[in-house]
């Protein structure tokens, strides 16, 4: 049986503020297998970006990884020195950030920024780095890559800047690519192009991918497995087909009710009532409790464990088996 390339166990990342402790990630666990695409979904503030930044060791004061293990090929990244992390970050595990404009330095050409990564991690000379940079721009679909190497970021459209960021992330042939909402800042047409590009590159490079989004429609296009985060905790995880056919957690149902469906007659969309929780000194109960349509007295007393309710389908809810969930959250 194939071994996971990345194992995250009970990851906890907290931010220490004067007002209290913000438990941004509180006990997240998952396995990532070679050539698998894991989608992480949830509202803003659910802990998605902090989870992957913890994997990259990009958490800075007042934030701190306070517990858990991040095992990449048997190495615990939490315990590595910053010098050792430099050999992994950007080379073995690479990341695409949300905003391609802020990810690129406006004072340097596209070629300078792409070649810098190649020379740093692969220890090659200028000519070799330039050839590799041209090859990568060509592979991500940038026209006239040799000429565009001398262009500045402001000379590219949003979609082309995103392709450049993808080229930089893939320039060292990483084992794992983390994509943090890579289609948020582009329009729907470009979004589809970027998704198709990422699927094609994932097959070409044979890499595992962690894809973060708040859009279930997007994650359905690319992910093999989906993990639903809320309040820094895993609410539900399952293979994509299973999650779409049989969502069990009331929060997952709420997310589905927020997206338009062409296969069902829906009179209106049902937003999840209330607001995401303030993560300062949260009580030891389900974070979705104040917004949950099927909460019981038991929910107000303790936090449910995440349990496997069918093969590969895990859920954190005392009432996951109840038909009340489907009846209370049904739309149309």
Image (cartoon, rainbow, N blue to C red):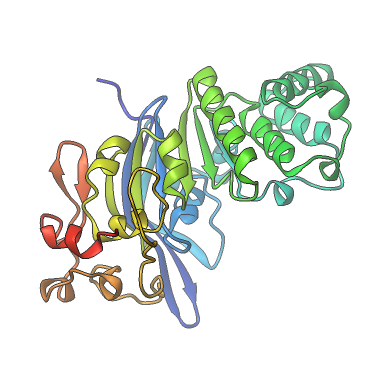
Residue 26, x across and y down, in percent: 34, 60
Give 329 or 99, whichever is nearer the viewer.
329
The residue lying at 50 percent from left, 53 percent from top is 49
Residue 186, x across and y down, in percent: 65, 46
The answer to whether residue 77 is seen in the rendering is no
The residue lying at 44 percent from left, 44 percent from top is 217
The residue lying at 83 percent from left, 17 percent from top is 127
Residue 139, x across and y down, in percent: 67, 21
Q: Furthest-bottom residue in view?
A: 19
Picture quadrant of residue 162:
top right
Left-right relation of 117 to 58:
right
Give 239 or 88, whichever is nearer the viewer.
239
The answer to whether residue 21 is seen in the rendering is yes
Give 4 or 290, whichever is nearer the viewer.
290
Left-right relation of 82 to 289:
right
The C terminus appears in which quarter of the rendering? bottom left
Left-right relation of 46 to 327:
right
């Amino acid at each position: 049986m194939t071994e996971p390339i990345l194992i995250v166990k009970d990851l906890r990342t907290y931010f220490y503020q004067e007002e209290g402790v913000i438990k941004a990630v509180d006990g997240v666990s998952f396995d990532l297998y070679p050539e698998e695409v894991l989608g992480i979904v949830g509202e803003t503030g659910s802990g998605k970006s902090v989870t992957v930044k913890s994997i990259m060791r990009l958490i800075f004061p007042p934030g701190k990884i306070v517990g858990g293990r991040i095992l990449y090929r048997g190495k615990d990244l939490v315990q590595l020195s910053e010098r050792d992390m430099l050999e992994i970050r950007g080379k073995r595990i690479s990341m695409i950030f949300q905003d391609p404009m802020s990810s690129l330095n406006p004072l340097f050409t596209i070629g300078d920024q792409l070649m810098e990564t190649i020379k740093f991690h692969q220890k090659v000379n200028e000519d070799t780095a330039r050839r590799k940079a041209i090859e990568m721009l060509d592979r991500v679909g940038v026209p006239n890559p040799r000429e565009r190497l001398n262009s500045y970021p402001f000379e590219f459209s949003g979609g082309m800047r995103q392709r450049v960021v993808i080229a930089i992330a893939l320039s060292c042939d990483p084992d794992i690519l983390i994509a943090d909402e890579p289609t948020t800042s582009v329009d729907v047409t470009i979004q589809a192009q970027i998704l198709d590009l990422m699927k094609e590159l994932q097959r070409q490079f044979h890499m595992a991918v962690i894809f973060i989004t708040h859009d279930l429609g997007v994650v359905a296009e690319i992910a093999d497995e989906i993990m639903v985060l809320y309040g820094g905790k895993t609410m539900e995880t399952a293979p994509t087909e299973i999650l779409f056919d049989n969502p069990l957690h009331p929060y997952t149902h709420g997310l589905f009710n927020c997206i338009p469906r062409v296969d069902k007659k829906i009179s209106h969309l049902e937003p999840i009532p209330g607001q995401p929780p303030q993560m300062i000194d949260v009580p030891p109960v389900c974070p979705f409790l104040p917004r949950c349509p099927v909460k019981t007295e038991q929910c107000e007393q303790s936090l449910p464990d995440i349990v496997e309710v069918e093969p590969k389908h895990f859920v954190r809810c005392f009432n996951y088996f109840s038909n009340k969930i489907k009846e209370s959250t049904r739309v149309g």
